[in-house]
Image: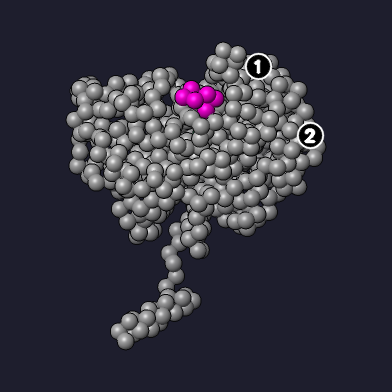
Amino acid sequence: MRRSLIGIAGLLFGLVLAAPGIAEEPRPGKAAVASAHGLATDTGHEILQAGGNAFDAAVAVSAALAVVEPASSGIGGGGFWLLHRASDGHSIMVDGRETAPSEAYRDMYLDEDGEVNRDLAINGPLAAGIPGAPAAWAHIVEEYGQLDLATVLAPAIRLAREGFPVDEKYRRLMGWRDDVVKRYPEAAEIFLVDGEIPELGHTLVQEDLARTLEKLAENGPDGFYKGELARKMVESVRGAGGIWSAEDLASYQVAEREPVRTSLRGHELLTASPPSSGGIAIAQILNMVEPWDLSEKTRVERIHLLSEAMRRAYRDRALYLGDPDFAEIPSEMLLSPHYAAGLRSTIRTDRATPSAMLAADAELEFAESDNTSHFSLMDDDGNLVSATLTINLPYGSGFVAEGTGVLLNNEMDDFAAAPGEPNAYGLIGFAANAIEPGKRMLSSMSPAIVLGPERTAVLGTPGGSRIITMVLLGILDFMDGNGPESWVSSPRFHHQYQPDEISLEPDFLTEEEISELQSLGHEVTTRDRTWGNMHGVMWNRETGQVEAASDPRWEEGSSRVE
Ligand code: GLY
């Protein structure tokens, strides 16, 4: 009897809440976009003002970044778009990761002595996976948007045709890759001026790319993956030593995947699932440190404990993670609190565990890089997008398919070219991430959304292997009550199992604190520059405040609430 009374009361309460105009769900009432480029952020707001929702705007921003930040992402690459729909709470990860061509094979980058040919693995068309970005853009607009693809892509087409001013970041990243770009006349013609890095402010026009975007806008994915454009790409790739086929392009499929979901002190954390390693690694680290009140610890204690958890999560990344459509990923085990408790019990508070004492050891070099792009976006209804996009190293493979303006990724290097052999980020992998035809290479991209009772956060960053730890630190900062200005600018540290070292951003710790870490047994390296380029947005339901911030260490980044 008591139960049925409660049931009726609940039903009546539900009806009252559902009655129009009585108790509506709160909505932000403002939109926020934070991306790596002002013109891309503008594009997001432009599409929102044209009647698009966050999902339309996300595709517009992705396509604009492909034009104005060609070093970092593009139509010839891929990414993960984490979507959260406010109306029904539906959350999903759109996986537009590149796939290995059908002629790819496990040892394709090994020379006759069994050594990895690093040049082939990162430069030129043999390094390129089949792009996923165009299929993902079309899928997001079709399934979740309110506008059509042609409307959403129009700003990017305009930017490609009219050009954009070359900025400091373009020049700096090209300084790293211009030797490779010079090898390929089509790429050099577009991205260099008379073989030199363009001057600051030079207007960079990409007419072929504008036409390629138009084909996608007019014909949907078939405009890119089939027909004349596909034929041109395959011909050009094969002519320069690559292995793409028409069938590889025609059969590319975007995937929808359940995000990794983690509970965090009354908040729900959504992050990227495999073939990204980010979500599982972040969840593992959070589970390992869960019983410790890190805010009560000194900086040294906090960095020590988190580094020990990072070390263990990156070891598991190397051992277990890869494309879930090909490799058996023990997600249940890796995400289990019991498994985390077992790992935690191996962490000493007074001593670092040498990585060599944990299985899967290998001697690695640590590589620096600034590549990939992230943006965070929220519309005035509270729809959310956290998207991380990439063509891998700056300017990808350096190769542009003739007559298409499509700069190809060099994402094949995210596979383990040989067991335990480091890639460009010093990351290792084994069978789960070995090269196989049609397989997606393991990624570190970790777009994240945190849904809390009072505050909602959207965040992410580029930065290769360090993406995972940067997003982790951003989430912890959010959980400590801070907003996006703080997440994007806080100093960072990183441990990735191998090399066995804590790396620090410059001017972070005092000499004394560094000595304390060393006395715990840590190798500590202070890098000569910062890393990452985080962009975040936050909505505080209690105050109604909407905030957005971009990493101040990059001038080109831009965040705006409207
Ligand atoms: N290409 C970098 C990543 O996906 O992690």
Disc 2 crowd rating (10 Å Cα; few below 14, some 14-19, many 20+) is: some
Q: Where are the magenta residues, as a range? A: 416-421
- Where does residue 196 sit, x and y in percent of width and height? 63, 16
Q: Nearer the viewer, mark 2 or mark 1?
A: 2
Q: Is residue 556 left or right of residue 211?
A: left
Residue found 68% across the figure and 45% down from its top: 154
Q: Main secondary structure of the magenta part?
A: loop
In the depicted structure, whether residue 20 falls above or below residue 458: below
Residue 417 lies in the magenta-colored region: yes
Residue found 72% across the figure and 47% down from its top: 220
- The secondary structure type at the circle numbered 2 is helix
The residue beneath circle 2 is 231
Q: Is residue 163 left or right of residue 230?
A: left
List the single residue furthest toward the bottom: 1
Residue type, label 2: Arg
Q: Is residue 513 visible?
A: no
- Where does residue 217 sit, x and y in percent of width and height? 72, 46
Residue type, label 1: Lys
The residue beneath circle 1 is 182
Residue found 71% across the figure and 21% down from its top: 241
User: Quadrant location of residue 313?
Assistant: top left
Q: Is residue 55 left or right of residue 211?
A: left
Q: Is mark 2 within 8 Å of ligand 1?
A: no
Q: Nearer the viewer, residue 334 or 66?
A: 334
Quadrant in which the N terminus is drawn = bottom left
Q: Is residue 212 left or right of residue 267?
A: right
- Where does residue 247 sit, x and y in percent of width and height? 74, 38
